[in-house]
Amino acid sequence: MENFKHRNKEIKFWSVTGEILGQNKYSETHVSSSGGGGYVGQHGGHVSAPTVHSTTVTNHEFWIKKEDGSEKSIQLAGHDIPLREGQKITLISAGIKGKDSGYFSVLVNHNANQHWFVNKADSLNKLLKIDQISGKSIFIAGGLWWLVTSITNSVGTGAIITGAFVVYRIATKIPRIIKMIKALNKHLESIAQQAYQNT
């Protein structure tokens, strides 16, 4: 599988192919509350009920028998992909080249001739930190403001130059990230199509 390159980062892809042996799906519900409270004084008061929030996550766990005969357990959190025993799948993972870990990105079901994105480009960007808005520009802007203000003895000039620098950084970085996400999504689709052909 061809790697994906963006600036100084290279994303490698690898896959495991096998036959579904068995599966289990279950849901987890997380409940939290916030707010509420109030006061009751001598002449009355106000009490408000807390707001309750719940989130349900579907977990999908299945076993596959790999082509070499060994078995592997796969766990997908937050995904409910239709699979059944006996179907042949390929699970593609992505990670930073030179590191030993990664994240599932595409699941290809060869029998159903369908594929699903477990982590699309925007998720992989967050997980692998390919190209993100960090905060370095703020530190650089602070240093630039101090330098310009020290040299010119003018806080206004320092603010104008620093503001122009921040606008420039935002105007160049955001379109670059959007372009990278589009290119990575296209690359993921290409890898999924290759997986169909490699069976």
Image (cartoon, rainbow, N blue to C red):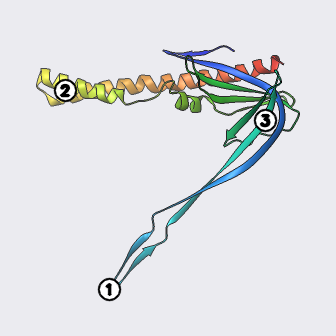
State left or right for residue 1 relative to residue 134: right
Residue 137 in the image, given as x and y percentages of width and height: 34, 27
Q: Earlier in the sequence, mark 3 or mark 2?
A: 3
Distance of mark 1 from mark 3, alpha carbons?
65 Å
Mark 2 element type: helix
Label 1: few (<14), some (14–19) or many (≥20) C-alpha neighbours in 10 Å: few
Whether residue 64 sits left or right of residue 133 in the image: it is right
| Residue beneath disc 1 | 42
Mark 3 or 2: the one toward you: 3
Q: CA distance from mark 3 to mark 2?
A: 59 Å
Q: Earlier in the sequence, mark 1 or mark 2?
A: 1
Task: In this rendered view, identify the residue nearer to me: 186 or 167.
Answer: 186
**Which mark is drawn over residue 137?**
none
Give the amino acid at mark 2. Trp
**Residue annotated with mark 3:** 63
**Label 1 SS:** loop
Q: Name the kind of residue labelled 1 in the image.
A: Gln
Near-viewer residue (27 or 43): 27
Q: Secondary structure at mark 3?
A: strand
Judged by depth in the image, the label closer to the viewer, 1 or 2, is 1
Residue 146 is marked as 2
